[in-house]
Amino acid sequence: MLPVTLRQVSKRYQLDSIDVPALGCIDLDILPNRFTVLSGPSGSGKTTLLNLIGCVDLPDSGEIVVAGQKVQSLSDNALADFRLRHVGFIFQNFNLLPVLTAYENIEYPLLLAKVNANERKKRITTLLDAVGLSEKSKHLPGQLSGGQRQRVAIARALATQPQLVLADEPTANLDSHTGAAIIALMRQMQRDLAVSFVFSSHDPQVLAAADDAVMIRDGQITEIKRSAEVV
Ligand SMILES: Nc1ncnc2c1ncn2[C@@H]1O[C@H](COP(=O)(O)OP(=O)(O)OP(=O)(O)O)[C@@H](O)[C@H]1O
Protein backbone atom coordinates (compact mmCIF):
# COMPACT_ATOMS: atom_id res chain seq x y z
CA MET A 1 0.00 0.00 0.00
CA LEU A 2 1.28 3.47 -0.87
CA PRO A 3 1.50 5.81 2.14
CA VAL A 4 -0.05 8.68 0.18
CA THR A 5 -1.76 9.11 -3.19
CA LEU A 6 -3.12 12.37 -4.58
CA ARG A 7 -5.32 12.40 -7.66
CA GLN A 8 -6.31 15.63 -9.45
CA VAL A 9 -5.95 17.57 -6.20
CA SER A 10 -6.59 21.32 -6.25
CA LYS A 11 -6.49 23.92 -3.50
CA ARG A 12 -7.36 27.64 -3.52
CA TYR A 13 -7.37 30.19 -0.73
CA GLN A 14 -9.83 33.07 -0.34
CA LEU A 15 -8.08 36.19 0.88
CA ASP A 16 -10.76 38.85 1.42
CA SER A 17 -12.37 38.94 -2.03
CA ILE A 18 -9.28 37.62 -3.81
CA ASP A 19 -9.12 34.03 -4.99
CA VAL A 20 -5.56 32.65 -4.64
CA PRO A 21 -4.89 29.42 -6.58
CA ALA A 22 -2.29 27.49 -4.53
CA LEU A 23 -2.27 24.02 -6.14
CA GLY A 24 -3.83 22.84 -9.39
CA CYS A 25 -4.61 19.27 -10.45
CA ILE A 26 -1.81 17.53 -8.58
CA ASP A 27 -1.19 13.80 -9.15
CA LEU A 28 1.42 12.32 -6.82
CA ASP A 29 2.35 8.98 -5.26
CA ILE A 30 4.53 9.02 -2.15
CA LEU A 31 6.40 5.71 -2.09
CA PRO A 32 6.86 3.64 1.08
CA ASN A 33 10.00 3.84 3.23
CA ARG A 34 11.53 6.68 1.28
CA PHE A 35 12.80 10.17 1.84
CA THR A 36 10.76 12.52 -0.38
CA VAL A 37 11.50 16.22 -0.71
CA LEU A 38 9.06 18.82 -2.05
CA SER A 39 11.19 21.54 -3.58
CA GLY A 40 10.39 24.81 -5.32
CA PRO A 41 10.53 28.59 -5.04
CA SER A 42 8.84 30.56 -2.28
CA GLY A 43 5.07 30.60 -2.79
CA SER A 44 5.11 27.60 -5.17
CA GLY A 45 2.77 25.55 -2.93
CA LYS A 46 5.06 23.29 -0.88
CA THR A 47 3.50 24.01 2.51
CA THR A 48 0.00 23.77 1.04
CA LEU A 49 0.86 20.35 -0.38
CA LEU A 50 2.44 19.21 2.90
CA ASN A 51 -0.66 20.33 4.82
CA LEU A 52 -2.87 18.32 2.47
CA ILE A 53 -0.67 15.21 2.72
CA GLY A 54 -0.69 15.57 6.52
CA CYS A 55 -4.49 15.93 6.70
CA VAL A 56 -4.10 19.38 8.30
CA ASP A 57 -6.17 20.84 5.46
CA LEU A 58 -8.54 19.35 2.87
CA PRO A 59 -8.49 19.95 -0.90
CA ASP A 60 -11.21 21.77 -2.83
CA SER A 61 -11.32 18.95 -5.36
CA GLY A 62 -9.62 15.66 -6.14
CA GLU A 63 -8.89 12.69 -3.90
CA ILE A 64 -6.27 12.14 -1.20
CA VAL A 65 -5.66 8.68 0.30
CA VAL A 66 -3.31 8.43 3.30
CA ALA A 67 -2.42 4.99 4.70
CA GLY A 68 -5.35 3.49 2.80
CA GLN A 69 -7.88 6.04 4.12
CA LYS A 70 -9.76 8.52 1.93
CA VAL A 71 -9.25 11.57 4.10
CA GLN A 72 -12.14 13.67 2.78
CA SER A 73 -14.63 11.10 4.06
CA LEU A 74 -13.58 11.64 7.71
CA SER A 75 -15.32 14.02 10.13
CA ASP A 76 -13.18 16.72 11.80
CA ASN A 77 -12.77 14.63 14.98
CA ALA A 78 -11.98 11.46 13.07
CA LEU A 79 -9.46 13.38 10.96
CA ALA A 80 -7.70 14.71 14.09
CA ASP A 81 -7.53 11.20 15.55
CA PHE A 82 -6.30 9.78 12.23
CA ARG A 83 -3.58 12.43 12.09
CA LEU A 84 -2.47 11.69 15.65
CA ARG A 85 -2.09 7.97 14.93
CA HIS A 86 -0.70 7.99 11.39
CA VAL A 87 1.27 11.19 10.83
CA GLY A 88 4.21 12.70 12.72
CA PHE A 89 5.13 16.38 12.24
CA ILE A 90 8.46 18.21 12.45
CA PHE A 91 8.47 22.02 12.12
CA GLN A 92 11.14 24.59 11.32
CA ASN A 93 10.62 26.33 14.67
CA PHE A 94 10.54 22.96 16.54
CA ASN A 95 7.10 23.68 18.17
CA LEU A 96 8.07 22.12 21.51
CA LEU A 97 6.00 22.98 24.57
CA PRO A 98 8.33 25.27 26.59
CA VAL A 99 7.11 24.19 30.05
CA LEU A 100 7.62 20.47 29.38
CA THR A 101 10.95 18.64 29.57
CA ALA A 102 12.40 16.80 26.57
CA TYR A 103 10.96 13.56 28.00
CA GLU A 104 7.52 15.12 28.54
CA ASN A 105 7.42 16.67 25.06
CA ILE A 106 7.96 13.22 23.54
CA GLU A 107 5.38 11.77 25.94
CA TYR A 108 2.69 14.30 25.02
CA PRO A 109 1.37 12.67 21.80
CA LEU A 110 1.50 9.28 23.54
CA LEU A 111 -0.80 10.59 26.28
CA LEU A 112 -3.17 11.91 23.61
CA ALA A 113 -3.07 8.52 21.89
CA LYS A 114 -3.79 6.82 25.28
CA VAL A 115 -0.66 4.64 25.17
CA ASN A 116 -0.15 2.92 28.55
CA ALA A 117 2.55 4.02 31.02
CA ASN A 118 4.93 1.08 30.52
CA GLU A 119 4.84 1.33 26.75
CA ARG A 120 5.27 5.12 26.94
CA LYS A 121 8.38 4.78 29.07
CA LYS A 122 9.84 2.12 26.77
CA ARG A 123 9.27 4.15 23.61
CA ILE A 124 10.53 7.45 25.06
CA THR A 125 13.69 5.87 26.51
CA THR A 126 14.45 4.16 23.19
CA LEU A 127 13.82 7.34 21.18
CA LEU A 128 15.86 9.58 23.50
CA ASP A 129 18.73 7.13 23.09
CA ALA A 130 18.27 7.00 19.30
CA VAL A 131 18.44 10.80 18.97
CA GLY A 132 21.41 11.00 21.39
CA LEU A 133 19.62 12.86 24.18
CA SER A 134 19.37 10.33 27.03
CA GLU A 135 21.40 12.68 29.23
CA LYS A 136 19.11 15.64 28.51
CA SER A 137 15.73 14.06 29.21
CA LYS A 138 14.96 16.44 32.09
CA HIS A 139 15.98 19.59 30.22
CA LEU A 140 13.39 22.14 29.13
CA PRO A 141 13.52 23.26 25.45
CA GLY A 142 14.99 26.60 26.59
CA GLN A 143 17.94 24.68 28.05
CA LEU A 144 18.70 22.92 24.75
CA SER A 145 20.48 24.05 21.56
CA GLY A 146 18.55 24.39 18.27
CA GLY A 147 19.89 21.06 17.03
CA GLN A 148 18.97 19.35 20.31
CA ARG A 149 15.46 20.84 20.17
CA GLN A 150 15.03 19.48 16.65
CA ARG A 151 16.21 16.06 17.91
CA VAL A 152 13.47 16.14 20.56
CA ALA A 153 10.98 17.11 17.84
CA ILE A 154 12.11 14.17 15.69
CA ALA A 155 11.66 11.79 18.64
CA ARG A 156 8.23 13.28 19.34
CA ALA A 157 7.19 12.88 15.68
CA LEU A 158 8.16 9.19 15.77
CA ALA A 159 6.71 8.37 19.21
CA THR A 160 3.28 7.31 17.98
CA GLN A 161 4.96 5.03 15.41
CA PRO A 162 3.37 6.79 12.42
CA GLN A 163 3.66 5.46 8.85
CA LEU A 164 4.39 8.97 7.64
CA VAL A 165 6.52 11.81 9.03
CA LEU A 166 6.17 15.29 7.53
CA ALA A 167 8.72 18.02 8.00
CA ASP A 168 8.25 21.65 6.93
CA GLU A 169 11.69 23.20 6.32
CA PRO A 170 13.23 21.22 9.23
CA THR A 171 16.71 22.69 8.81
CA ALA A 172 15.68 26.33 8.14
CA ASN A 173 16.58 27.54 11.64
CA LEU A 174 19.80 25.55 11.99
CA ASP A 175 23.33 26.34 10.85
CA SER A 176 24.52 24.15 7.98
CA HIS A 177 26.65 21.86 10.19
CA THR A 178 23.78 21.20 12.62
CA GLY A 179 21.37 20.92 9.67
CA ALA A 180 23.56 18.22 8.11
CA ALA A 181 23.59 16.28 11.41
CA ILE A 182 19.79 16.54 11.65
CA ILE A 183 19.35 15.32 8.06
CA ALA A 184 21.66 12.37 8.78
CA LEU A 185 19.67 11.54 11.92
CA MET A 186 16.33 11.70 10.07
CA ARG A 187 17.78 9.52 7.29
CA GLN A 188 18.95 6.99 9.87
CA MET A 189 15.60 6.93 11.68
CA GLN A 190 13.72 6.67 8.38
CA ARG A 191 15.75 3.58 7.43
CA ASP A 192 15.73 1.98 10.89
CA LEU A 193 11.99 2.40 11.40
CA ALA A 194 10.94 1.95 7.75
CA VAL A 195 8.86 5.13 7.81
CA SER A 196 8.11 7.43 4.87
CA PHE A 197 9.47 10.95 5.36
CA VAL A 198 8.19 13.90 3.31
CA PHE A 199 9.92 17.28 3.58
CA SER A 200 9.42 20.69 2.15
CA SER A 201 12.76 22.37 1.81
CA HIS A 202 14.87 24.95 0.02
CA ASP A 203 17.99 23.42 1.55
CA PRO A 204 20.32 21.82 -1.06
CA GLN A 205 21.56 19.46 1.69
CA VAL A 206 18.03 18.10 2.15
CA LEU A 207 17.53 17.79 -1.61
CA ALA A 208 20.82 15.92 -1.95
CA ALA A 209 19.74 13.41 0.72
CA ALA A 210 16.37 12.66 -0.94
CA ASP A 211 15.33 9.40 -2.61
CA ASP A 212 12.59 11.25 -4.46
CA ALA A 213 12.47 14.96 -5.30
CA VAL A 214 9.17 16.54 -6.30
CA MET A 215 9.75 19.86 -8.05
CA ILE A 216 6.90 22.37 -7.71
CA ARG A 217 6.37 25.67 -9.48
CA ASP A 218 3.27 27.90 -9.48
CA GLY A 219 1.16 25.22 -7.82
CA GLN A 220 2.05 22.51 -10.35
CA ILE A 221 4.44 19.55 -10.20
CA THR A 222 6.98 20.18 -12.94
CA GLU A 223 9.16 17.11 -12.38
CA ILE A 224 9.56 14.08 -10.11
CA LYS A 225 13.09 12.70 -9.83
CA ARG A 226 13.20 9.26 -8.26
CA SER A 227 16.49 7.59 -7.36
CA ALA A 228 17.61 4.59 -9.40
CA GLU A 229 16.26 1.73 -7.29
CA VAL A 230 12.57 2.26 -8.20
CA VAL A 231 12.90 3.63 -11.73
N1 LIG B 1 -3.80 31.00 4.30
C1 LIG B 1 -3.60 31.52 3.08
N2 LIG B 1 -4.42 32.46 2.58
C2 LIG B 1 -4.23 32.96 1.33
N3 LIG B 1 -3.23 32.58 0.51
C3 LIG B 1 -2.38 31.66 0.96
C4 LIG B 1 -2.49 31.08 2.27
N4 LIG B 1 -1.49 30.18 2.44
C5 LIG B 1 -0.77 30.21 1.30
N5 LIG B 1 -1.30 31.08 0.41
C6 LIG B 1 -0.82 31.34 -0.97
O1 LIG B 1 -0.78 30.09 -1.65
C7 LIG B 1 0.40 29.99 -2.46
C8 LIG B 1 1.24 28.79 -2.00
O2 LIG B 1 1.73 29.05 -0.68
P1 LIG B 1 2.63 28.00 0.14
O3 LIG B 1 2.77 28.53 1.52
O4 LIG B 1 2.06 26.64 -0.03
O5 LIG B 1 4.03 28.09 -0.66
P2 LIG B 1 5.48 27.56 -0.24
O6 LIG B 1 6.04 26.95 -1.48
O7 LIG B 1 5.39 26.70 0.96
O8 LIG B 1 6.24 28.90 0.11
P3 LIG B 1 7.50 29.16 1.11
O9 LIG B 1 8.65 28.39 0.53
O10 LIG B 1 7.69 30.64 1.02
O11 LIG B 1 7.09 28.69 2.48
C9 LIG B 1 1.11 31.34 -2.32
O12 LIG B 1 0.68 32.15 -3.40
C10 LIG B 1 0.61 31.88 -1.01
O13 LIG B 1 0.65 33.29 -1.01
Image (cartoon, rainbow, N blue to C red):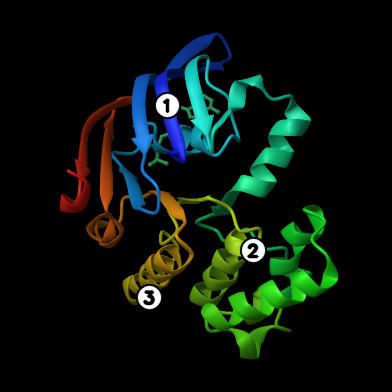
Considering only order in the chain, which callout, 3 or 1, is on the residue closer to the N terminus? Answer: 1
Asked if residue 102 shows in the view, the reply is no
Residue named by callout 3: 181
- The disc label shown at residue 159, or none: 2
Residue drawn where x is 53% and y is 68% of the image: 150
Q: Position of residue 23 (x, y in %)?
A: 40, 22
Q: Is label 3 within 8 A of ligand 1 (CB to nearest ligand atom)?
A: no
Considering only order in the chain, which callout, 2 or 1, is on the residue closer to the N terminus? Answer: 1
Q: Amino acid at mark 2?
A: Ala
Of residue 150 and residue 198, the one placed in the foreground of this image is 198
Considering only order in the chain, which callout, 3 or 2, is on the residue closer to the N terminus? Answer: 2
Q: Amino acid at mark 3?
A: Ala
Under circle 3, the secondary element is: helix
The Cα–Cα distance between marks 1 and 3, rounded to whole angstroms, is 31 Å
The Cα–Cα distance between marks 2 and 3, rounded to whole angstroms, is 20 Å
Residue at far bottom of view: 135
Under circle 1, the secondary element is: strand
Residue at far front of view: 1
Image quadrant holding the C terminus, namely: top left
Of residue 204 and residue 32, the one placed in the foreground of this image is 32
Q: Is residue 192 above or below residue 211?
A: below
**Crowdedness of circle 1 by 10 Å Cα count: few (<14), some, many (20+)?**
many
Mark 2 vs 3: CB contact within 8 A: no
Q: Is residue 37 above or below residue 186?
A: above
Q: Is residue 19 above or below residue 219?
A: above
Image quadrant holding the N terminus, namely: top left
Q: Position of residue 181 (x, y in %)?
A: 37, 75
Asked if residue 190 shows in the view, the reply is yes
Mark 1 vs 3: CB contact within 8 A: no
- The disc label shown at residue 6, or none: 1
Q: Position of residue 170 (x, y in %)?
A: 45, 58
